[in-house]
Image: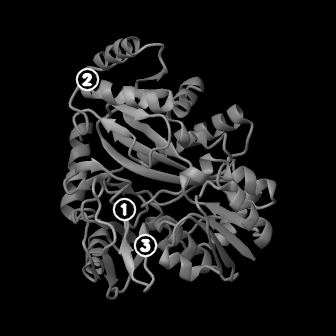
């Protein structure tokens, strides 16, 4: 059988590797807009288009290759309607249709959805639409920011590659800064969301769904800030970790139950609101607070880096997982994972994310046992050398029986890769995890 994969990042490299582990020996057809050297080696057909949202080129590839199943990796082609096209062409696709994908492509849609259907997890928020004049906008925005006691978050409404959220005290120096960014978002998207600033510990909870059943994937914690100790600008994610229980050391079983309950209600509300069956991934960014679990945002696809915590330890045949999703039989296929801890650390070009040093050679000298790498935004020159691009370069994954060992394996793997790169050494370390545990205990009064 033929399997179509849309995308060419580290997430897609990990998905492609899982596809080819299937005993069904599928052919991998990749629709990409850049060359991923690792993914290209796995593919039977590697079609490079001008853009991942070029649905005309995608249609031509599908009509030629006739794949049975597909996964759409990145958010942009999902938001552009790639799943609609693939379903029209008779391909079983693990990704939601365009209307349902608003769960990710519009922050205001999701907040309004939870409010309309009385689903718990929303912070205090307001959605601001385009105003007739800037003075009116400034007055309304300032008034709500003041009502939140100056503790607020500004969220761009549309897709911003994980960099559209700015938090007062972290990225914004008060109400005036917040106003400036909010107006910038209003002018760009016509909408902006202002929310209360939540205090707690964040976690990523991904669920596969066929529209009826939710199948939980291992929970992880992402690290958005570029530098150690959670300093520096936001990025697409510098790394993640998940322990051998499939949870995280600072979470209680009730936290996972709350995240699941919220997602179940959102799935039902989405079905009612859109009249569509959501088939794919509901990936919730949640935060455990003293007042329970709150929703930060939803994504409508596998996370990146979170996918790299999941796919290397997935035991169930991924082809069968995808078939169960598209045929509505996910309840009959329990997902199995190795009881392993995983630590993902991204190597990124020097200067990332503001002024990344592109065009520098990367050399992989070898990897230790239980360490995997997945290529992301790299270039390949005429001589076959792998070069840094302008974004994250290589995800290094350590896999072991516990987090301490997995983190050490990831660092050992990184030591075997040469180039003008840096990474966050603190991700997955005992010191950082202990800090997270104590932080949440203090907040909860435990």
Q: Where's residue 342, x and y in %? A: 38, 69
Please tell me whether mark 2 sits on a helix, a strand or a loop: helix
Q: Residue at x 57, y 40 (%)?
A: 103
Compare residues 36 and 415 and report the one nearer the observer: 36
Q: Nearer the viewer, mark 2 or mark 1?
A: 1
Q: Which residue is mark 1?
A: 390
**Residue closest to the eye, 237 or 189:** 189
Circle 1: element type: loop
Q: Which quadrant does the N terminus fall into?
A: bottom right
Give how far apart the Cα atoms at labels 2 and 1 are: 32 Å
Give the x, y percent position of residue 21.
59, 80
The residue where tag 3 is placed is: 379
Q: Residue at x 48, y 13 (%)?
A: 132
User: The C terminus lies in which quarter of the figure?
Assistant: top left
Asked where in the image residue 114 lies, by quadrant, the reply is top right
Q: Which is more toward the observer, 83 or 110? A: 83
Q: Nearer the viewer, mark 2 or mark 3?
A: 3
Q: Position of residue 3 (x, y in %)?
A: 69, 71
């Amino acid at each position: 059988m033929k399997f179509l994969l849309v995308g060419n990042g580290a997430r897609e490299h990990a998905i492609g590797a899982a596809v080819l582990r299937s005993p069904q020996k599928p052919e991998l057809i990749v629709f990409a807009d850049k060359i991923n050297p690792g993914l290209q080696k796995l593919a039977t057909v590697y079609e490079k288009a001008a853009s991942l949202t070029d649905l005309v080129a995608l249609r031509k590839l599908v009509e030629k290759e006739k794949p049975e199943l597909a996964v759409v990796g990145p958010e942009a082609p999902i938001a552009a309607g790639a799943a609609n096209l693939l379903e029209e062409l008779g391909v079983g696709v693990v990704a939601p249709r365009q209307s349902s994908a608003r769960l990710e492509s519009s922050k205001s849609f999701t907040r309004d959805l939870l409010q309309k259907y009385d689903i718990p997890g929303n912070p205090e928020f307001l959605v601001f639409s385009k105003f007739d004049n800037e003075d009116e906008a400034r007055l309304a925005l300032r008034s709500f920011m003041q009502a939140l006691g100056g503790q607020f978050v500004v969220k761009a409404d549309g897709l911003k590659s994980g960099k559209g959220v700015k938090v007062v005290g972290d990225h914004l120096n008060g109400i005036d800064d917040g106003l400036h960014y909010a107006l910038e978002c209003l002018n760009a998207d016509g909408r902006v969301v202002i929310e209360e600033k939540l205090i707690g510990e964040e976690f990523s909870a991904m669920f596969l769904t066929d529209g009826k059943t939710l199948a939980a994937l291992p929970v992880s914690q992402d690290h958005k800030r570029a530098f150690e100790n959670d300093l520096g600008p936001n990025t697409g994610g510098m790394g993640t970790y998940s322990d051998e229980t499939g949870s995280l050391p600072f979470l209680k079983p009730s936290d996972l139950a709350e995240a699941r309950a919220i997602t179940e209600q959102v799935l039902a509300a989405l079905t009612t609101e859109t009249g569509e069956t959501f088939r794919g991934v509901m990936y919730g960014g949640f935060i455990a607070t003293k007042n329970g679990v709150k929703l930060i945002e939803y994504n409508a696809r596998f996370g990146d880096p979170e996918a790299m915590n999941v796919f290397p330890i997935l035991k169930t045949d991924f082809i069968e997982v995808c078939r169960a999703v598209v045929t509505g039989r996910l309840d009959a296929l329990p997902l199995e994972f190795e009881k392993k801890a995983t630590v993902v650390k991204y190597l990124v070009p020097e200067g990332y994310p503001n002024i990344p040093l592109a065009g520098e050679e990367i050399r992989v000298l070898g990897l230790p046992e239980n360490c995997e790498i997945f290529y992301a935004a790299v270039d390949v020159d005429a001589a076959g050398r792998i070069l840094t691009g302008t974004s994250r370069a290589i995800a290094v994954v350590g896999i072991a029986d516990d987090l301490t060992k997995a983190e050490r394996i990831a660092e050992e793997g990184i030591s075997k890769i040469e180039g003008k790169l840096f990474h966050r050494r603190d991700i997955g370390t005992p010191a950082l995890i202990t800090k997270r545990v104590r932080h949440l205990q203090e907040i909860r009064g435990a």
